[in-house]
Image (spheres, rainbow, N blue to C red):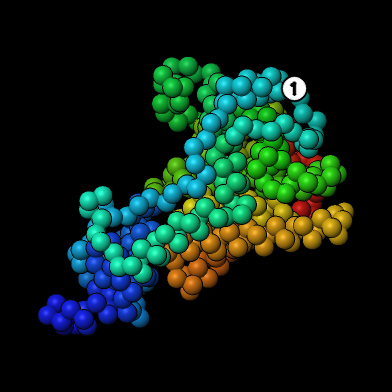
């Protein structure tokens, strides 16, 4: 394609990456919104791509998505500036976390045996010069994108709650660790340790109370429900959460590693699918041999690593997207005992979550077709997560029948019809 450098007017009309129509300057050069959004996502999320060819793939409008490696390289070659990309702004603002008080309270609670997952009213948790000049249309677009994030109706608060949960979990895991030498001056683990079955079950018990607090405080309008309906929704949600969050945390920790077979566990340690029997060694709650127990659970763990984490890697799932999935797990109308009023509330909340997700994608400068694709890719993860949860639950029931280990108290009383 001939260069249009000599003709400024015609040059401005096309994207220098894919030769589609340009709508202005993005990150230093004239480009279309699709290429600008692609460059922004790649830089802000620190994505890396591999070319399946000879790194000379043609990048044109009809096939600009064929090779992301060559597309990104062309962005750089044509002059797009990494320094001009601003990280996604958290519209939540500064947070003041009273971690010390809450961790002390959790420490007291962890000594109490939980017979079933509680669901009661909970207390409130405290919660450049390198940038090129842009056209007026681009400035308007950028301002609109940033404002969109700040107008999320419920996803923003849910995300704040999830971040708060992670902070408390990290502090509590450090408090419960038996290897003090593995902690730095801030109480964080220096190196990942192998996880243990007993430790994970202990963490699962106090996390039930913590998640209950988080849901009541941050997942609107859950607090407006009656106690019985809270129980119904929370029991199903907590089982999904305890089985899917390890997959998401493992994606964040190990997703960049090729051939990884490790899973990050709730106690802050990890397990290897190829050495799963180590997870059950020296456990007072395991009655069978570690090898027998590992044989039952290994297929479900491998499914999580290969299918679930594989899907998350393929779509480059973000934390906002993951929190949206958590919201859909919670607001699930497949429970027969709910009142018609509550079912209507569930449908309204599902709609708000999907609207917020759409606005979040718009804030990332995605085109409407890209938003449709991204939403579809995310929704395709739901049945896979559901299958993973049911595989693990069936394994638990099988292990209990053969008395290989004590049943997982966290999901023992979960309704069998609580599927998404």
Dot 1 crowding, Cα within 10 Å, few <14, some 14–19, many 20+:
few
Q: Residue at x 52, y 24 (%)?
A: 174
**Going by the picture, which residue comes out furthest to the front?**
136
Residue situated in front as seen by the camera: 368 or 286: 368
Name the residue tied to disc 1.
Answer: 112
| Whole-percent x, y for residue 162 in the image | 58, 42
Disc 1 secondary structure class? loop
Q: Is residue 75 left or right of residue 363?
A: left
* 384 up-or-down from 121: above or below: below
Q: Determine if residue 68 is in view.
A: no
Q: Determine if residue 88 is in view.
A: yes
| Whole-percent x, y for residue 227 in the image | 84, 41
Quadrant in the picture for residue 207: top right
Q: Residue at x 33, y 74 (%)?
A: 23
Name the image quarter holding the C terminus: bottom right
Q: Residue at x 66, y 22 (%)?
A: 105
Q: Residue at x 45, y 60 (%)?
A: 145
* 72 up-or-down from 385: above or below: below
Name the image quarter holding the N terminus: bottom left
Quadrant in the picture for residue 205: top right
* 216 up-or-down from 47: above or below: above
Residue situated in front as seen by the camera: 172 or 215: 215
| Whole-percent x, y for residue 289 in the image | 64, 32
| Whole-percent x, y for residue 166 in the image | 55, 36
């Amino acid at each position: 394609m001939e260069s249009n450098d000599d003709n400024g007017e015609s040059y401005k009309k096309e994207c220098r990456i894919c030769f589609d129509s340009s709508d202005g300057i993005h990150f230093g050069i004239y480009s279309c919104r699709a290429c600008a959004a692609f460059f922004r996502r790649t830089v802000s999320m620190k994505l890396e791509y591999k070319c399946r060819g000879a790194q000379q793939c043609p990048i044109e409008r009809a096939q600009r998505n064929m090779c992301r490696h060559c597309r990104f390289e062309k962005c750089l070659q044509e002059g797009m500036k990494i320094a001009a990309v601003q990280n996604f702004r958290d519209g939540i603002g500064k947070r003041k976390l009273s971690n010390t008080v809450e961790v002390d309270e959790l420490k007291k609670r962890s000594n109490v045996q939980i017979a079933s997952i509680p669901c009661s009213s909970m207390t409130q948790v405290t919660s450049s010069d390198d940038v090129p000049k842009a056209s007026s249309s681009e400035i308007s677009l950028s301002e609109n994108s940033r404002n969109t994030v700040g107008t999320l109706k419920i996803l923003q608060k849910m995300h704040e709650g999830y971040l708060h949960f992670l902070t408390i979990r990290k502090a509590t895991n450090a408090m419960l660790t038996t290897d003090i030498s593995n902690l730095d001056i801030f109480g964080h683990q220096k190196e990942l340790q192998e996880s243990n079955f007993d430790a994970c079950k202990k963490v699962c018990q106090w996390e039930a109370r913590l998640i209950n607090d988080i849901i009541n405080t941050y997942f609107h309008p859950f607090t407006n429900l009656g106690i019985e309906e809270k129980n119904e929704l929370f029991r199903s949600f907590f089982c999904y959460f305890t089985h899917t969050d390890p997959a998401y945390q493992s994606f964040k920790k190990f997703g960049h590693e090729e051939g990884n077979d490790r899973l990050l566990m709730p106690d802050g340690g990890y397990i290897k699918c190829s050495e799963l029997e180590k997870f059950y060694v020296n456990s007072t709650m395991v009655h069978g041999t570690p090898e027998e127990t590992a044989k039952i659970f290994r297929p479900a763990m491998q499914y999580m690593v290969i299918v679930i984490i594989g899907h998350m890697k393929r779509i480059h799932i973000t934390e906002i997207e993951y929190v949206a999935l958590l919201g859909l797990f919670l607001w699930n109308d497949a429970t027969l005992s709910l009142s018609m009023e509550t079912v209507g509330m569930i449908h309204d909340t599902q709609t708000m979550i999907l609207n917020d997700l759409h606005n979040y994608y718009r804030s990332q400068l995605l085109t409407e077709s890209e938003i449709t694709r991204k939403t579809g890719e995310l929704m395709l993860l739901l049945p896979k997560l559901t299958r993973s949860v049911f595989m693990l639950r069936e394994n638990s029931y099988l292990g209990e029948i053969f008395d290989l280990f004590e049943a997982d108290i966290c999901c023992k009383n979960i309704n069998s019809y609580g599927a998404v």
